[in-house]
Image (cartoon, coloured by chain):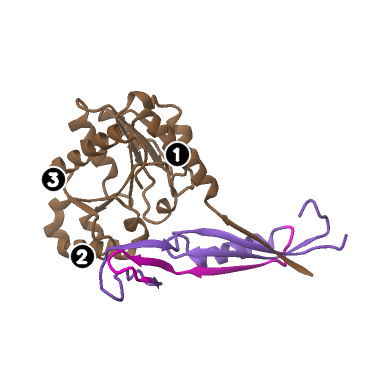
Chain colours: A purple, B brown
């Protein structure tokens, strides 16, 4: 943004995994305050929850859960591997650039 | 035209980078590192005091102790014979890899068999911060209730060992060991649960063996297995 003066930050897209330890609502609350006080007070903050993704080691079935129900829905095994939902990540920025 | 810039940047990238460097440093030194997490008052400090008293003649140990304020826990650990680096986090509710890097710089890691990291008492945020440790220990205690694993699944899911302290109070607190075990099994069927009481000493031997095993494993294979 510093390299292109005049460009504006429109939105920040954040992904919160179920196993990240972050609470999407609290993060949203805090980030709205930070955005309002930033150089781009109109910037929107979009927070998207990402479910816990698992793969059963017993039967290979891949599935997702939002409620920490970790047992495989196909074979009921608890021997599952976490394949997604660990991260808290900044997915993308939406910017309005000025024409050069 | 609005433009979308894809970043896919992990927010904890900087912590993870420092944690990876810490893990390398711990492996070089051949020191077994355990990160202890629990709610305030579950008994992390008591567990480390007893560990120091009972294993002090056998293993060379030290601790990094994180607390919001005061040096009370660090003073207790030092009194029990455990050299301790204190990190006062001020308002911080967890230790991060930078704080542990700075604290570890004041310790002679090469002269240690075990480094315990006593995290800030909190079952939420510490789970998200890798500190380069070999093993994560969650200390729970019977007065907290038997449904703690259900209410704080992230930290329990990340653990390698659960210490269930204050077993001497199990009668008065109405705590169900079976229910606690069932909640843990639902999250991680393979998770080791060690029932003990730091006050009476009951069950401590199994914990001391767990520490000895960690030391032996790191001597054989210093890097992280997870």
Q: Residue at x 11, y 59 (%)?
A: B171
Q: Quadrant of the N terminus of chain B?
A: bottom right
Q: Nearer the viewer, mark 2 or mark 1?
A: 2
Is A43 inside the magenta-drawn segment?
yes
Q: Earlier in the sequence, mark 2 or mark 3?
A: 2
Q: Left of B151 or right of it: where is A37?
A: right
Label 3 Cα crowd, 10 Å radius (few <14 / some 14-19 / many 20+): some
Is residue A59 or residue B42 the one in the foreground?
A59
Is residue B123 or residue B206 the one in the foreground?
B206
Q: Chain of mark 1?
A: B
CB atoms of marks 1 and 3 within 8 Å? no
Distance from disc 2 to disc 3, alpha carbons, whole Å, reads: 20 Å
**Residue B147 can be seen, yes or no:** yes
Q: Which residues are magenta?
A: A39-62
**Residue B174 can be seen, yes or no:** no
Q: Which residue is mark 3?
A: B203
State the image quarter where residue B49 is shown: top left
State the image quarter where residue A5 is shown: bottom right
Q: Nearer the viewer, mark 1 or mark 3?
A: 3
The residue tagged with tag 1: helix, strand or loop? strand
Q: Chain of mark 3?
A: B
Q: Which residue is mark 1?
A: B88
The residue tagged with tag 2: helix, strand or loop? helix
CB atoms of marks 2 and 1 within 8 Å? no
Q: Earlier in the sequence, mark 2 or mark 1?
A: 1
- Residue found farthest to the right: A100
């Amino acid at each position: 943004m510093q390299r292109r003066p005049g460009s504006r930050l429109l939105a920040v897209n954040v992904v919160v995994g179920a196993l990240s330890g972050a609470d999407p609502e609290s993060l949203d609350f805090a980030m709205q305050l930070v955005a309002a006080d930033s150089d781009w007070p109109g910037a929107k903050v979009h927070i998207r929850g990402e479910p816990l993704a698992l793969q059963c080691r017993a039967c290979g079935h891949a599935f997702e859960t939002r409620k920490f129900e970790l047992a495989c829905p196909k074979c009921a095994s608890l021997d599952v591997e976490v394949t997604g939902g660990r991260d808290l990540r900044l997915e993308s920025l939406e910017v309005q650039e000025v024409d050069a | 035209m609005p433009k979308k810039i894809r970043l896919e940047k992990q927010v904890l990238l900087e912590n993870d980078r420092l944690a990876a460097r810490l893990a390398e440093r711990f492996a070089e030194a051949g020191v077994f590192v355990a990160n202890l997490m629990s709610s305030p008052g579950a008994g992390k400090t008591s567990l480390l005091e007893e560990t120091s008293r009972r294993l002090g003649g056998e293993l060379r140990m030290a601790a990094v102790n994180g607390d919001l304020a005061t040096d009370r826990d660090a003073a207790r650990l030092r009194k029990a014979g455990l050299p301790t680096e204190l990190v006062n986090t001020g308002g911080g509710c967890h230790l991060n890899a930078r704080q542990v890097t700075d604290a570890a710089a004041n310790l002679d890691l090469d002269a240690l068999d075990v480094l315990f990291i006593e995290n800030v008492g909190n079952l939420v945020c510490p789970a998200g911060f890798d500190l380069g440790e070999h093993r994560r220990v969650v200390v729970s205690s019977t007065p907290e209730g038997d449904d703690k694993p259900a209410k704080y699944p992230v930290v329990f899911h990340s653990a390698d060992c659960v210490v269930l302290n204050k077993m001497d109070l199990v009668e008065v607190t109405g705590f169900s060991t079976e229910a606690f075990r069932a909640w843990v099994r639902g999250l991680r069927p393979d998770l080791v649960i060690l029932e003990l009481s730091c006050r009476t000493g009951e069950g401590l031997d199994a914990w001391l063996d767990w520490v000895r095993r960690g030391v032996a494993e790191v001597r054989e294979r210093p890097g992280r297995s997870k």
